[in-house]
């Protein structure tokens, strides 16, 4: 299957197979007017199978969100059909308004206008803790 | 400007300095009777409490200061829908320091972000209660002379008991502390505390459901109440509330030089007959709470 290359835009590569639609929604790509291609289950030497998203527009991608969902994703910036930058992600130290605290006793449940802020407490296992109540939230891979 | 939201906001050295100051206040109360003259403490208790609020108020009065505040959320603007941040920012216009208790976890941290005066967390849900921890540390020091190297047993509700979580965290920064955790399976210490605090700091620990098994090796027995308000299910509460009761017979298993602590209030978990035993120090612990809060208020106000 062939999909046209991106001229000016972004290619998200090495997405864990099956996660591309989650990323599509998290990055609000459905709001774009430009061409967006989602390739699922592409053969990969590194991962076996992977997903790829091609966005034919230069947009600001929230790297924190992407890093949280899957720190193994590669972000390729394309200009005039040429790869000009390759960004490797990592788990962000802080997540703001990406995930919500599910502790019914947390102050964020009583005052919903507060920013939902989580800090990385265990990078090995991808565990984040609510800065208000310390409740753990893990599994960005499942976001 | 400093706040006290979590016991870990203070370094071990700062905590030792506070305990030293509290001991000096006990030894020479006259020296401190006017240090907070013309200063006001606001006690904002969005959740009912007797001893903590009165302890803060007595502490401020003994430092020569005065006290304003409320003891029930119904009598504050919260009942009209005001956010806790707005309530605290308003009160901060009238007071020099605020001690607040709130049923929602993280509320004191939230308000400390915007407060122009020091905030003391006087308990936020099942989360933190750092002044109780300071009280507990002062009690251990006064009773036993040191904190390093002790074997401390925690008994009762170790899952929801915030005093337990805070004290274990504080003790993890001392040398040679050993823990014995006595609780029903449903009320065990949460996994995150075991992993992030106990294991991470290499504290030797064991779990048991037998008081007779645990008591002979302890220097400190820290009893806790199973708190009805932490349960969503009344049946669970009724099933677990009387699982561990310390009575005169069980006291025979405890070493002669050990102490029994309890953050109070108690319900059934310590028989009143134990009160006369010199090892029962929970009412002396209450008294220590006032002195350590005096030390804290003085320190945070920088007077």
Image (cartoon, coloured by chain):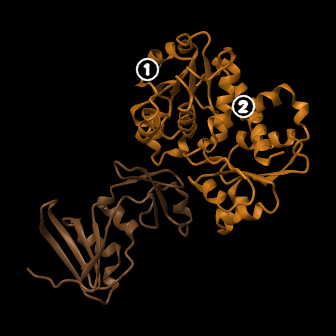
Chain colours: A brown, B orange
Q: Is residue A96 left or right of residue B117?
A: left
Q: What chain is tagged by disc 1?
A: B
Kindly identify which residue carries mark 2: B19
Q: Residue at x 63, y 48 (%)?
A: B5
Q: Is residue B202 left or right of residue B92?
A: left
Residue B210, disc: 1
**A124 lies above or below B197:** below
Q: Residues within 10 Å of mark 2 (few under 14, many from 20)?
A: many
- The image position of residue B81, as x and y in percent, is 64, 68
| Quadrant in the rendering for residue B116 | bottom right
- Residue situated furthest left in the rendering: A1
Alpha carbon separation for disc pair 1 and 2:
33 Å
Q: Nearer the viewer, mark 1 or mark 2?
A: 2
In the rendering, at what x and y percent does residue B148 appear? 59, 22
Q: Earlier in the sequence, mark 1 or mark 2?
A: 2
- Quadrant in which residue B132 is drawn: top right
Can you tell which quarter of the image residue B262 is in? top right
* Residue occupying the point 72% across, 64% down: B89
Viewer-proximal residue among A92 and B257: A92
Q: Quadrant of the C terminus of chain B?
A: top right
């Amino acid at each position: 299957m062939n999909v046209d290359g991106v001229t000016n835009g972004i290619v998200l590569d090495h997405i864990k197979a099956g996660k591309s639609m989650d990323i599509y929604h998290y990055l609000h790509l459905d709001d774009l007017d430009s061409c967006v291609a989602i390739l699922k289950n592409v053969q990969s030497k590194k991962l076996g199978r992977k997903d790829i998203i091609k966005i034919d527009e230069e947009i600001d991608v929230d790297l924190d969100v992407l890093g949280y969902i899957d720190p193994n994703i590669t972000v390729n910036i394309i200009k005039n059909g040429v790869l000009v930058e390759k960004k490797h992600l990592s788990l962000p130290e802080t997540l703001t308004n990406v995930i919500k605290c599910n502790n019914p006793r947390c102050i964020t449940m009583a005052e919903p206008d507060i920013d939902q802020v989580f800090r990385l407490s265990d990078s090995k296992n991808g565990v984040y803790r609510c800065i208000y109540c310390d409740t753990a939230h893990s599994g960005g891979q499942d976001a | 400007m400093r706040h006290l939201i979590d016991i870990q906001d203070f370094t071990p050295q700062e905590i030792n300095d506070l305990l030293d100051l509290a001991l000096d206040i006990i030894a020479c109360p006259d020296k401190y009777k006017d240090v907070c003259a013309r200063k006001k403490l606001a006690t904002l208790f969005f959740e009912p409490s007797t001893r903590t609020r009165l302890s803060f108020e007595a502490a401020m009065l003994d430092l020569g200061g005065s006290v304003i505040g409320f003891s029930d959320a119904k009598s504050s603007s919260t009942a009209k829908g005001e956010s806790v941040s707005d309530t605290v920012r308003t009160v901060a216009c009238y007071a020099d320091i605020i001690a607040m208790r709130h049923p929602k976890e993280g509320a004191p941290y939230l308000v400390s972000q915007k407060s122009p005066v020091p905030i003391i967390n006087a308990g936020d849900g099942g989360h933190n209660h750092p002044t109780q921890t300071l009280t507990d540390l002062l009690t251990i020091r006064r009773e036993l002379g040191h904190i390093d190297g002790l074997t401390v047993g925690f008994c009762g509700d170790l899952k929801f008991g915030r005093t337990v979580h805070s004290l274990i965290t504080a003790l993890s920064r001392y040398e040679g502390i050993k823990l014995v955790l006595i609780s029903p399976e449903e009320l065990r210490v949460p996994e995150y505390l075991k992993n992030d605090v106990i294991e991470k700091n290499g504290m030797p620990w064991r779990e048991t459901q037998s008081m007779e098994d645990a008591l002979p090796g302890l220097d400190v027995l820290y009893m806790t109440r199973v708190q009805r308000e932490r349960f969503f299910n009344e049946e669970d509460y009724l099933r677990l509330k009387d699982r561990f009761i310390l009575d005169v017979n069980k006291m025979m298993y405890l070493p002669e030089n050990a102490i029994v602590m309890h953050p109070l209030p108690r319900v059934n978990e310590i028989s009143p007959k134990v009160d006369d035993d010199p090892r029962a120090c929970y009412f002396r612990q209450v008294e220590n709470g006032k002195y350590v809060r005096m030390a804290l208020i003085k320190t945070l106000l920088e007077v």
